């Protein structure tokens, strides 16, 4: 796991080189804040690629920014890349253990991975294998916890009432994907 974390900065560097939101080596704090704001706006607008590259660029300059790691985890989760989301939420929590939204989203990402694993197991086992029935039951239970139908895609909409916002205008209640933003 530590080996994966050591590769993340290199991956971010390679990815960020192609981004319009790429950070320059000489960026001042105001420019870095603008990069963060632009990345959050891209996220809100549904432009996950732009949000991802902007946050990765920011993290090259501020690798200790737990909120940026958290937001990058959200980008990965919304893009269905739950394993990357798990690693990124863990990085945010290693920097700021009291970032409870990251802890919540980490749990949701684990549940999403569990659901996908049980669905895959169910598909891969033969009808005569007792594990197939167990996998179907577990997939159903995990999907129920996530409030999705077992055969549903990972991005089914779930409606929530209006939620209060934090200082950056992000929701303080779970979004349609059960994730805190």
Image: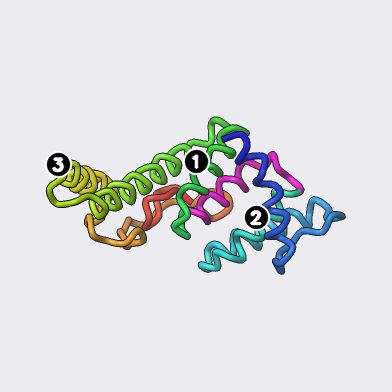
Magenta range: 61-76
Give the labeled residue for mark 2. 55
Q: Is residue 150 magenta?
A: no
| In the image: residue 42, left or right of residue 171 | right
Q: Nearer the viewer, residue 158 or 164?
A: 158
- Residue on which disc 1 sits: 102
Query: Within 10 angstroms of label 3, few (less than 14), some, or many (20 or more) residues?
Result: few
Tell me where residue 153 appears, x and y as whole percent.
Answer: 31, 62
Q: Nearer the viewer, residue 158 or 60?
A: 60
Please tell me whether mark 3 sits on a helix, a strand or a loop.
helix
Label 2 SS: helix
Where residue 159 sits, quadrant-wise, is bottom left
Q: Main secondary structure of the magenta part?
A: helix
Do tag 2 and tag 1 residues touch (Cβ < 8 Å)? no
Q: In the displayed structure, would residue 80 be above or below residue 64?
A: below
In this rendered view, identify the residue nearer to me: 168 or 174: 174
Q: Where's residue 128, x and y in %?
A: 12, 48
Q: Which residue is denoted by mark 3 in the rendering?
A: 130
Cα separation between marks 2 and 1 = 16 Å
Q: Locate the N terminus and report the quarter of the image it occupies.
A: top right
Q: Residue at x 41, y 46 (%)?
A: 109
Instruction: Point out the residue furthest to the right here.
Output: 26
At x 71%, y 64%, the residue is 21
């Amino acid at each position: 796991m530590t080996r994966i974390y050591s590769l993340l900065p290199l991956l971010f560097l390679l990815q960020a080189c192609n981004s319009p939101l790429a950070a320059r080596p000489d960026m001042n704090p105001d420019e870095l804040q603008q990069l963060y704001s632009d990345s959050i706006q891209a996220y809100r607008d549904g432009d996950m690629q732009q949000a991802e590259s902007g946050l990765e660029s920011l993290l090259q300059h501020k690798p200790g920014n737990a909120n940026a790691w958290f937001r990058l985890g959200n980008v990965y989760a919304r893009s269905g890349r739950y394993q990357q989301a798990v690693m990124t939420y863990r990085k945010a929590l290693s920097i700021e253990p009291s970032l409870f939204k990251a802890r919540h989203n980490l749990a949701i990402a684990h549940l999403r991975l569990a659901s996908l694993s049980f669905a895959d197991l169910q598909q891969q086992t033969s009808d005569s294998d007792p594990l197939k029935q167990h996998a179907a039951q577990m997939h159903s239970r995990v999907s129920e916890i996530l409030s999705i139908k077992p055969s549903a895609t990972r991005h089914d909409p779930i409606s929530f009432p209006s939620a209060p916002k934090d200082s950056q205008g992000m929701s303080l209640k779970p979004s349609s994907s059960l994730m805190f933003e």
